[in-house]
Image (cartoon, rainbow, N blue to C red):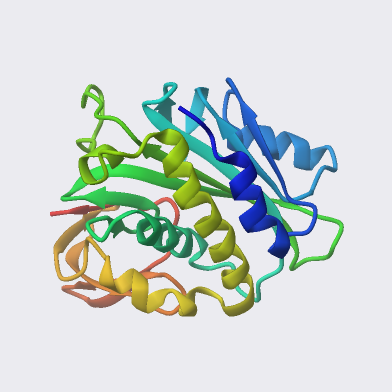
Amino acid sequence: MTWPLETIWEQVAPSLPGFTVELLPEVDSTNSELMRRARGGRLEPTLLVAERQSAGRGRLGRAWQAEPGASLTFSLGLVLAPTDWSGLSLAVGTAVAGALHPAVQLKWPNDLWVQDRKLGGILIETASTPGGARARFVIIGVGLNVRPRPPNGLSTPPACVQELLPELDAGSSLGLVAPAVADAAKRFEADGFAAFQAAFGQRDALAGRPVRLSDGTAGAAAGVDGHGALVVHTAAGPVAITSSEVSVRPA
């Protein structure tokens, strides 16, 4: 397997001055490594790829296991100053799905699904910068199952990239997805989630389906609003769900 790091750099560097690409054989978490660097003052735009993660993390602190070749794990860190941060994970998910395959759907707020099975996920974290209140160093973490994996211990059965595109390995998947993520980050900074709302809606895995929230609320999912909040029609009326502490499942 080869990693198209130079090709990615050539595609992304013109729009991200100072951009670098780095491959690590192993790290606890690419998000955690970029956060450590940011807290040490290293804020240059960086794509960090790991062949193996020993302590990868997903949303709400869930573990994300990544073995060499079986998964793709990378993080993009860069300084952004959007007017509104709402909906960034949805924008990134839309870009990743669009770069991969028409069958990839998006499950609010940060999962990529194929036929109700989890293909991957996105984890967004930010750190303060000296550039003022609006500018923050954002770390966009992406994890994808590339090869088939057993469902042991997983709450959602896994899907994988090779089901849809058998010719892809982790390296070629990175070559498709990483430039799309970088482009989406800059577009989000300029135009916000509204620029991605229609494309997200075309891939929304929950739209029109009965759902149940982890706080016990039940209703029907009715898409997302212009800020990326999930709209759920409940017995008490429509509710916009924005809390990162609420999980949503098809009922």
Quarter location, residue 62 = top left
Looking at the figure, which quarter contains the C terminus? bottom left
Residue drawn 78% across the image and 49% down it: 44
**How many discs mark residues in the rendered view?**
0
Residue drawn 15% across the image and 71% down it: 208
Nearer to me, 19 or 39 = 19
Above or below for 204 versus 246: below
**Residue 91: image location, x then y, percent:** 46, 65
**Residue 119 in the figure: left or right of residue 43:** left
Residue drawn 45% across the image and 27% down it: 1
**Residue 246: image location, x then y, percent:** 36, 53
Nearer to me, 71 or 11 = 11
Above or below for 56 versus 74: above
**Residue 142: image location, x then y, percent:** 48, 44
Inspect this view and state whether residue 195 appears.
Answer: yes
**Residue 82 in the figure: left or right of residue 133:** left
